[in-house]
Amino acid sequence: MTRVDMTGTEHGGTGGGRPGPSGRSGSAPGRLGRLARLRRDPGIWRRGILLAVFAVALTLLMALHAQIPNRLGNLGSLTETFLPWLGLFVPVLLLLALLRRSATALIALLLPAVVWLNLFGGLVADKSSGGGDLTVATHNVNADNPDPAGTARQLAGSGADVLALEELKADMVPVYERELAERYPYHSVQGTVGLWSRLPLRDPRPVDIHMGWTRAMQATVVAPQGELRVYVAHLPSVRVNLDAGFTASQRDTSADALGAAIANDRAQRIVLLGDLNGTMNDRSLNAVTAQLRSTQGAAGDGFGFSWPASFPMARIDQILVRGVEPVASWALPETRSDHLPLAARVAF
């Protein structure tokens, strides 16, 4: 029986060793020796305990995010807004665990990795497909947009059949109407939101979301395949500051009002387009999100972050549907707004 000398290396030892395929003597025994020493190292389990504790804490934070209370500065909603980004800690912990040569930390790291994949793994793959009957788009154009005409022309070239705009300043509305008129012969503006369509619109009217002025509307798009109720909404903004935390009470009240309007709508097919100032993970939007499907979640490619446009970190603009099937969902190229426009294709 051949005996392998585990102590020999290419730099010394009792055996000379024969050259391996690479021409270097003792390379395979050297690797085996390093593995053997690593297995015999008792510190491999004692090192990295703090890293393992951090990995477990990260796991609990992601798995139990719904249990984080909102009573203190809406901390739960703040965590849920940026929940996907917690996954960045996994490769950082992996690197530290390897540098520390800690088996304990490496094993513990499996926990947050599995939980993150369970929560967001489905968003990583491209779920889009061909076909579809109608393309819809939404864009918060920014009241301070320095080039509304350019933004309008860019959106007109997107190929959308139905286009929703939010944060329309009164003196800019004529600019959008002029630039979008050729592509979209039908439109309605209600307060600071508007809807443009290649297909006839019926019964456009404001929707009360308890703000004191109009930032939501609905209309019926009359398509060859059937009627589609379209809601356009711009929920109140949220703020993050040291004194009050994540202040979102007005947004939450408006979300409840919008959710009630949709719940009472008997339309067979509904699409909600707009800036909800919150993500699908944010529990405070449950009145809306519990009733509708996200086109990005059902048929998107990646996370589809929309804000801020310069470095998107959250999808606070949404395309949500009921009664139609999403077949594709994507972000459109950046305009002069601080939000990215979004588009989706749906089948009746």
Image: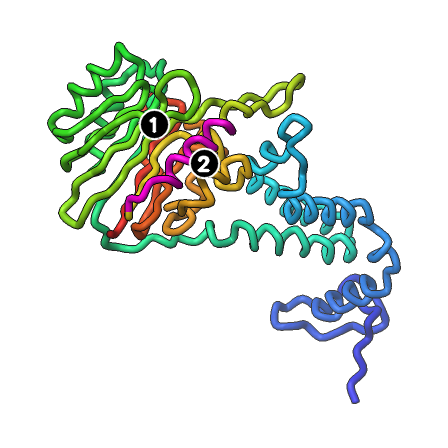
State the quadrant of the N terminus. bottom right
Q: Position of residue 221 (x, y in %)?
A: 20, 38
Q: Quadrant of residue 32?
A: bottom right
Is 234 one of the magenta-colored residues? Answer: no
Residue ID at (66%, 51%): 112
Question: Residue beneath label 1, please?
Answer: 207
Q: Nearer the viewer, residue 53 or 192?
A: 192
Residue 16 visible in image: yes
Residue ID at (31%, 41%): 271
Q: Nearer the viewer, residue 32 or 206?
A: 206
Q: Position of residue 310 (x, y in %)?
A: 43, 26
Q: The disc labelled 2 sits on which kind of residue?
A: Arg
> Which secondary structure type mostly characterizes the magenta part of the structure?
helix
Residue 327 visible in image: no
Mark 2–mark 1 distance (CA, rounded to whole Å): 23 Å
- What range of the chain is rendered magenta? 252-267
Residues packed near mark 1 inside 10 Å, few (<14), some (14 to 19) or many (20 plus): many
Question: Residue beneath label 2, please?
Answer: 315
Q: Is residue 104 above or below residue 330?
A: below
Q: Does residue 147 appear left or right of residue 184 in this picture?
A: right
Query: Which of marks 1 and 2 precedes in the sequence?
Result: 1
- Badge nearest the viewer, 2 or 1: 1
Residue ID at (39%, 37%): 318
- Secondary structure under tag 2 reads loop
Q: Nearer the viewer, residue 129 or 286?
A: 286
